[in-house]
Image (cartoon, rainbow, N blue to C red):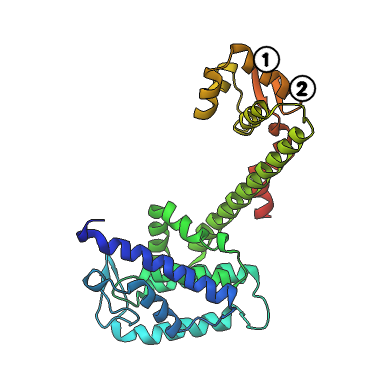
Amino acid sequence: MPESREYLGTEVKNVLDALNQIFNETVKNNAVSYISPELIKNFHGMIGKELGVHFEAIPGKFRENNVVVGTYRAPEYNFVSELMQRLCDWLKNEFKFRHDEEQDFLDAVIESIVTHVYVAWIHPFGDGNGRTARLLEFYLLLRGGMPNICSHILSNHYNETRSEYYRQLDHAGKTRQLTDFIDYAVQGFLDGLSDVLWNIQKHQMNNSWKNYVYDIFDAHKKINKPKRNRMRSLVLNLEFFKEYSLEEIQLINVDLAAQYKILSKRTIDRDVADLVSMGLMEMKGNKYISQISSLVKQLPTKRQIQQKVSS
């Protein structure tokens, strides 16, 4: 990376290091606590580490100047410490987190959302408020028992719908109510959960299919090794639900294309016919499809998963 842009790499590294540290302390060491001004400053310090002039704030210290972000004028700097303390006290009393028992799932999600919004509104630092808010959000979801893979969903949702995020944030500020922003965030969270569950399910099915294919070939020991490897590679490289002609199958990847190029035309015909007879492929008209499609059809659809998550 050019020297003039090295700070961008430091920014990314700081965020990744912070996420890893928070994960290790929260999940592995179970070092959880209430949200406090000191915790928030600590997260901000992680974000601004070693950025120098590229970070327009003192890492880990509340601002001592007034700021305007676009058309939004943040609270006067001399009120920041008091506002942050009041926010932390309110979070502690409102969302019922206890060290000796698991926090309610809904409380954890809503607390993470409103904490993000209030940090954005108070704007306690001269720089890095958004990154600090996302770290707090990540921490609160982890603390509430959310798996690591799901604790990034809200942050991803805001990034993927950035224009709507700013519109909702502005609307919440003007109306002095959070209902619409919470609706927007929760819907994004539910959609993200559905995506995660769907991807996990596809991954599990892919692994199950791979194991099944290997078991089938283990039961056909008379097939010589070169043919076995070629046929197994062929069927495992077929995309779900996609129909292939014989010509397309030969070109499914570079390695198979190279093998079939030096073999006779009848080889691909025999390989595919054998895979059909083994129940690993199915003929549909003049094309072929992986039999994993039959297994996948037994799974709930993504829409069904979304409906279940939302219920």
Q: Amino acid at mark 2?
A: Ser
Q: In the displayed structure, would residue 246 be above or below residue 219?
A: above
Is label 1 in contact with label 2 (beta carbons under 8 Å)? Answer: no
Residue hosting label 1: 285
Tag 2: Cα neighbours inside 10 Å, few (<14), some, or many (≥20)?
few
> Is the C terminus in the top left, top right, bottom left or bottom right quadrant?
bottom right
Res 279 → quadrant: top right
Residue hosting label 2: 277
Res 277 → quadrant: top right
> Is the N terminus in the top left, top right, bottom left or bottom right quadrant?
bottom left
The one of 281 and 100 positioned closer to us in this rendering: 281
The one of 148 and 276 positioned closer to us in this rendering: 276
Answer left or right for 244 relative to 209. left
Q: Where does residue 63 sit, x and y in percent of width and height?
A: 29, 80
**Residue 176 visible from this viewpoint:** no
Q: Where does residue 10 sit, x and y in percent of width and height?
A: 32, 65
Q: Amino acid at mark 1?
A: Gly
Q: Where does residue 200 sit, x and y in percent of width and height?
A: 63, 50
Secondary structure of the residue carrying tag 1 is loop
Sequence-first tag of 1 and 2? 2
* Residue at 61 percent of width and 51 percent of height: 194
**Residue 234 visible from this viewpoint:** yes
Residues under labels 1 and 2: Cα distance?
Answer: 16 Å
Secondary structure of the residue carrying tag 2 is helix
Select label 1 or label 2 by which is in front: 2
Tag 1: Cα neighbours inside 10 Å, few (<14), some, or many (≥20)?
few
Q: Which mark is residue 111?
A: none
* Residue at 42 percent of width and 59 percent of height: 168
